[in-house]
Amino acid sequence: YSSLFQHALNSGVRRYHVAPVLCQRAKVAMSHFEPNEYINYEKLEKNINIVRKRLDRPLTLSEKIVYGHLDDPAKQEIERGKTYLRLRPDRVAMQDATAQMAMLQFISSGLPKVAVPSTIHCDHLIEAQLGGEKDLRRAKDINQEVYNFLATAGAKYGVGFWKPGSGIIHQIILENYSYPGVMLIGTDSHTPNGGGLGGICIGVGGADAVDVMAGIPWELKCPKVIGVKLTGKLSGWTSPKDVILKVAGILTVKGGTGAIIEYHGPGVDSISCTGMATICNMGAEIGATTSIFPYNARMKKYLGKTGRADIAALADEFKQHLVPDSGCQYDQVIEINLSELKPHINGPFTPDLAHPVSDIGAVAEKEGWPVDIRVGLIGSCTNSSYEDMGRSAAVAKQALAHGLKCKSKFTITPGSEQIRATIERDGYAKVLREVGGLVLANACGPCIGQWDRKDIKKGEKNTIVTSYNRNFTGRNDANPETHAFVTSPEIVTALSIAGTLKFNPETDYLTGADGKKFKLEAPDADELPKLEFDPGQDTYQYPPKDGSGQHVDVSPTSQRLQLLEPFDKWDGKDLEDMLILIKVKGKCTTDHISAAGPWLKFRGHLDNISNNLLIGAINIENGKANSVRNALTQEFGPVPDTARYYKKMGVKWAVIGDENYGEGSSREHAALEPRHLGGRVIITKSFARIHETNLKKQGLLPLTFADPADYNKIHPVDKLSIVGLKDFAPGKPLKCIIKHPNGSQETIMLNHTFNESQIEWFQAGSALNRMKELQQKSS
């Protein structure tokens, strides 16, 4: 990076100066990598003032930034939880697994270049196996075709490319691209991490990213705002992670759906900027649209340390727009006293099952969960900051001083090349290795199932503790018997040293190599390095000024990449006599619908990845995963095979789901696959926000039971008809006729959240088809 920084300094990008006579504000670049793209607080201010005058009330911080990015602030209907907003985000970020499909969709749009600053980040395709350097070399070799596609597509269409080894997308965004007041959308559900720097950063599917890259206003249902008032002060073993673990326990995995979580109050200032990012990151686990903190001195300090003092100076000038108005109203308020908050650990199998660390040993024994910890894993996009690594190293140092190492296996995932290089220089990595740790690549790794785990057999009951964000069944290692718990990095480190869930570092003693008992002191570490960050290796590829001559190669025989064919348009008729592919029992996340891990290699090849459709979902008919009745042959077989058979026979099908269907990752493959294999309708008790939008974008009908009890009226052997589609309109329920095998029929009503333009997506066959129709009309 050093040459980049020098270039930025030489060209005057980072100098901040206000001419006293003219009072003209200096232009400040959005990032070091885009010296000609400037932060536009003036427009934000102008839009906020228009909306404030119209609404005539104090505004929350979330409202200021969201409404400050409205396409038409003077005429936009604004009602929290009701109206759809048309927004103009400042930038787009894509991780490599979702970027493949996003860039394939952008290519098929026919546009020459992205309309807003955009980046691709290579972090999802690196499998944890032997350690950082070896795993990175292997990933570059295995994924060469995909990396080459993303690098050349980025160069052709004006997208910055962060090479494999650069780090996890969310850490890179925090270090380089997020800033107070930005609106950023990212093709990953943990994009809200950027809220730790006072931005509105929202996770979306690739089709939404394509809209923004194409210069089309982006639609979002006007979010409600949940206020979390923080009082008191963090201290001792309690960390920022414990704030969100506590909030997840209160709100549950769907309690934040349709809302932005806005943290405020005097307790905020006791949390570091990267700690605030941790809290915002895991807000994805409660279904929140995003989370945000108000601009403060901790953010200013972080901006300065990451070479962006000019942005901090500009933010200081506009601070009134980067904090909530006094007297603003929240839709719900939760209050947490940080001085009383205890260290927490959540799990297993769901991130909202919250326990104080002091209780987990007893609870685990009572529930029959294994108490011996096989592996402790720290890092991930949630907890891999300099402060996190420092606090973990502070715990490890104490164990080493008493001759102890970790009883459990122990892994460390640095969040970025900058973090890796800096913790190597400052000795943290050495300490963590000495206590028994293996430093993995700067990538997602085990957090998303990229883990070649060898210490257990599949089906073996065991416990792991992580500083990650998600712990759904089988997510980390594809073993449904792995009981995964999420907590802070320092608690993971302490528990890994003790080797058991029955250890509470606040009260319990360890026995040193000399036989003497000792207690771990609460860790203390700097939030930022005393010296400047060491940027490590330069891992960024600038897009050329003119990429029109760049060739993007997709081989027709490739098993990893496949150009997209447009989905078929709606034929103007009702959907009659659809078969039910599967009636899902219980939790069905996007991991259940489109598994990650080994399937990540097919993220750019829709037909190949469709072979994982719903293989993790439990069929209510037999209680099994990936085993459904073929209604045409009466034989049981895998879900994808059955869907392909129906498609081949020209038969449309539906899926019946439970609560919060599609929670978890933002992966749009969970919407593309059912559409590709002939699905038409997904009917559930409720949807997770991102997945519902993704389904609409691909021309599917996500519908919900007007009466949730009607879920019980539909049986896997029934046929379904959706009638009244010629009169499909916003706010008007659709009629569903259930035809039972004995000839009897029942009629139920289904709700939807489609607006006018989304109905046009359905009619055109997909949002991308509709975009092309509009382009043809305008040309």
Image (spheres, rainbow, N blue to C red):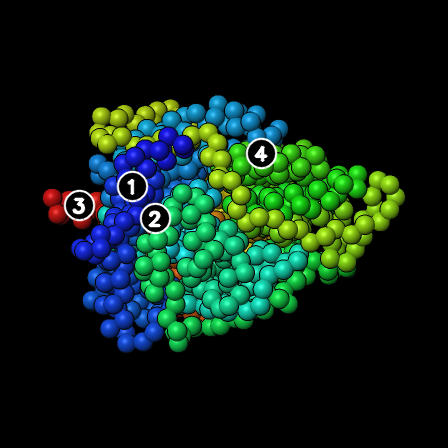
Residue underneath mark 3: 775
Residue 13's disc is 1
Q: Is residue 243 left or right of residue 563?
A: right
Residue 373 image position (x, y, % from top left): 73, 45
Q: Gap between marks 1 and 3, in whole Å?
A: 36 Å
User: Mark 4 vs mark 3: which is more N-terminal?
Assistant: 4
Q: Mark 1 or mark 3: name the one nearer the start of the chain.
A: 1
The Cα–Cα distance between marks 4 and 1, rounded to whole angstroms, is 30 Å
Q: Residue at x 84, y 49 (%)?
A: 517
Disc 4 residue type (three-letter) = Glu
Seen at 73% across and 61% down, the residue is 359
Q: Residues within 10 Å of mark 3 (few under 14, many from 20)?
A: few
Which of discs 2 and 3 lies nearer the camera? The answer is 2
Q: Earlier in the sequence, mark 2 or mark 1?
A: 1
Q: For marks 4 and 3, give the one nearer the viewer.
A: 4
Q: Nearer the viewer, residue 240 or 661?
A: 240
- Residue carrying label 4: 424
Q: Is residue 660 or residue 70 the one in the foreground?
A: 70
* Apparent side of residue 393 relative to residue 768 in the rendered image (left or right): right
Q: Residue furthest front?
A: 21
Residue 603 visible in image: no
Label drawn at residue 223 = none
- Rendered image quadrant of residue 380: top right
The amino acid pointed to by label 3 is Gln
Q: Quadrant of residue 627?
A: top right
Q: Earlier in the sequence, mark 4 or mark 1?
A: 1
Q: Is residue 15 visible?
A: yes
Of marks 4 and 2, the one in the foreground: 2
Label 4–label 1 contact, CB within 8 A: no
Q: Residue at x 87, y 41 (%)?
A: 514
